[in-house]
Image (cartoon, rainbow, N blue to C red):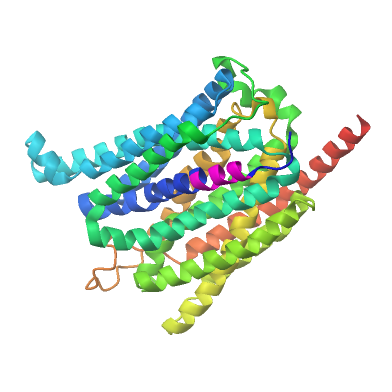
């Protein structure tokens, strides 16, 4: 394979990657807020929506990834997938309790229940097309078009894009919702995603090395004992990805709510703190991920995990009566956490691509999703929400319209729990280092 990723591929990576991550960020953050603010402050419904979305994403990626291998075509899955993905996002703009009550002649309680069910179902439908286009086909396309020597750099960019998207969504979309409302937001975002897919029809090209391979029976390919045994570095990397993902999901779904309620940050304050942490963390990682292409990625995980854990511990301890001190120190801890967050993600992503057999990249995207999405999205929020419920911190003064209402608010202990989960990585990374070294020795013997 040609070593240079190429300018056009870089543009495709950034545009499709960023728009896809913005769509996922809106789902992870604003669909939840949409439910709380326009339907009902029902945390159980939100939790169920997150969990079913993770299950749907994983199952879809298993099937769609296998299909993209079977057809030898990522381009159509990405392009047409984005087109339909955008349409399903726009449909959320049509959902409201009042509309449902009027159309179905329901009382308020029945309309709320029906609206919650429809939101969860539509979220799963949207996830089917999003996962087909982004999780399955786009990720396989990146693997097809990169070589080992440049994957650290590519994964560095891919790891930064979710944070850039989070910055755009957490800050800018909050202002948009206040100005134009949820309906216009969903219509506008859906249109952008659909246009992106339409552009892809004419600009996306598959790798010349991509060939038709496999059958639908290959959906279970990644679970075969022989495949696991034959790719030990890949599967241990996926275990590390899963542990890291659970650590992130313990606190990440509640981060903005924590800053707004427990720390009493305004939208401007948390946007500035979050924004500076993301920008600085991303800038440092542009250097670190380039370094990863010349160093042992498995050994660098020690440093990345240590930085991530240290940042989470800082976020646990840094909350004071003095708001200025909290803003400053929580911001510093957030910067440290995000630096490690991006670096761990980039290293795990690069190692996964390095040790994914290129002729079976599509088949293995579903297995990757189990560890990167399914397990973290089921167990992470479950742990985090259990901690929040146990802490039972009462609501702050609700006189400010900027504070989201719920029965209880996130507790600082979610960051401590995240740090403890992240510390488990230090027990698994040595296994990866040994297996990677053994694999390298076997390749030299050959």
Which range of residues does the magenta coloring cover? Answer: 7-15
Question: Among all residues in the image, which is located at the extreme right?
Answer: 445
x, y percentage for residue 282?
A: 58, 61
Task: Please determine whether, in this image, residue 106 is positioned above or below residue 358.
Answer: below
Q: Is residue 6 above or below residue 64?
A: below
Q: Residue at x 39, y 42 (%)?
A: 193
Vertical arrangement, residue 153 with respect to residue 271, above or below: above
Q: Which of 165 and 407 lies nearest the eye of the viewer?
A: 165
Quadrant where the C terminus is found in the figure = top right
Please state the horizontal and vertical placement of residue 274, each as a whole percent of the image: 47, 67
Q: Quadrant of the N terminus?
A: top right
Q: Is residue 144 left or right of residue 277?
A: right
Q: Is residue 8 magenta?
A: yes
Q: Is residue 365 left or right of residue 294?
A: left
Q: Quadrant of residue 145?
A: top right
> Predominant secondary structure in magenta?
helix
Query: In the depicted view, which residue is nearer to us: 115 or 269?
Result: 269
Q: Looking at the picture, does residue 149 appear above or below residue 359?
A: below
Question: Where is residue 140 shown, x and y percent of the image?
Answer: 59, 33
Is there any visible trace of residue 309 in the rendered image?
no
Q: Residue at x 60, y 48 (%)?
A: 243
Q: Position of residue 320 (x, y in %)?
A: 46, 80
The residue sitting at 72% across, 36% down in the picture is 355
| Residue at x 35%, y 73% (from the top left corner) | 266
Side (left or right) of 121 relative to 146: left
């Amino acid at each position: 394979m040609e070593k240079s990723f190429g300018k056009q591929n870089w543009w495709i990576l950034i545009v499709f990657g960023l728009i896809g991550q913005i769509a996922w960020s809106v789902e992870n953050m604003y669909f939840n807020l949409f439910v709380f603010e326009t339907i009902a402050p029902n945390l159980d419904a939100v939790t169920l929506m997150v969990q079913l979305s993770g299950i749907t994403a994983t199952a879809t990626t298993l099937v769609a990834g296998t299909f993209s291998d079977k057809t030898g075509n990522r381009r159509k899955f990405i392009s047409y997938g984005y087109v339909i993905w955008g349409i399903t996002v726009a449909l959320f703009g049509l959902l409201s309790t009042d509309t449902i009550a009027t159309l179905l002649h329901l009382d308020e309680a029945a309309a709320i229940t029906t609206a919650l069910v429809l939101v969860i179902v539509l979220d799963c439908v949207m996830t089917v097309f999003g996962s087909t286009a982004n999780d399955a086909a786009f990720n396989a396309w990146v693997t097809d078009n990169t070589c080992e020597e440049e994957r650290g750099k590519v994964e560095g960019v891919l790891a930064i894009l979710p944070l850039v998207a989070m910055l755009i969504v957490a800050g800018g979309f909050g202002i948009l919702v206040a100005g134009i409302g949820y309906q216009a937001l969903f219509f506008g975002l859906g249109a952008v995603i659909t246009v992106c897919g339409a552009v892809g029809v004419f600009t996306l090209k598959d790798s010349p090395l991509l060939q038709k391979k496999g059958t639908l029976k290959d959906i279970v390919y990644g679970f075969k004992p022989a495949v696991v045994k034959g790719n030990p570095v890949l599967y241990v990397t996926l275990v590390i990805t899963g542990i890291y993902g659970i650590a992130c999901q313990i606190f990440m779904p509640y981060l903005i709510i924590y800053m707004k309620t427990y720390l009493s940050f305004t939208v401007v304050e948390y946007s500035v703190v979050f924004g500076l942490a993301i920008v600085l963390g991303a800038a440092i990682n542009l250097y670190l991920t380039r370094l990863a292409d010349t160093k042992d990625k498995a050994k660098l995980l020690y440093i990345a995990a240590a930085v991530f854990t240290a940042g989470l511990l800082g976020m646990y301890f840094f909350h004071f009566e003095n708001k200025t001190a909290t803003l400053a120190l929580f911001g510093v801890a957030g910067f440290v956490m995000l630096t490690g967050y991006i670096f761990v993600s980039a290293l795990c992503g690069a190692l996964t691509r390095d040790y994914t057999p290129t002729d079976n990249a599509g088949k293995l995207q579903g297995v990757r999703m189990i560890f990167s999405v399914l397990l973290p999205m089921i167990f992470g929020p479950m742990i985090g929400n259990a901690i929040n419920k146990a802490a039972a911190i009462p609501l702050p003064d609700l006189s400010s319209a900027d504070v989201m209402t719920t029965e209880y608010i996130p507790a600082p202990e979610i960051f401590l729990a995240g740090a403890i989960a992240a510390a488990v990585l230090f027990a698994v990374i040595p296994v990866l280092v040994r297996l990677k070294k053994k694999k390298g020795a076997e390749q030299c013997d050959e």
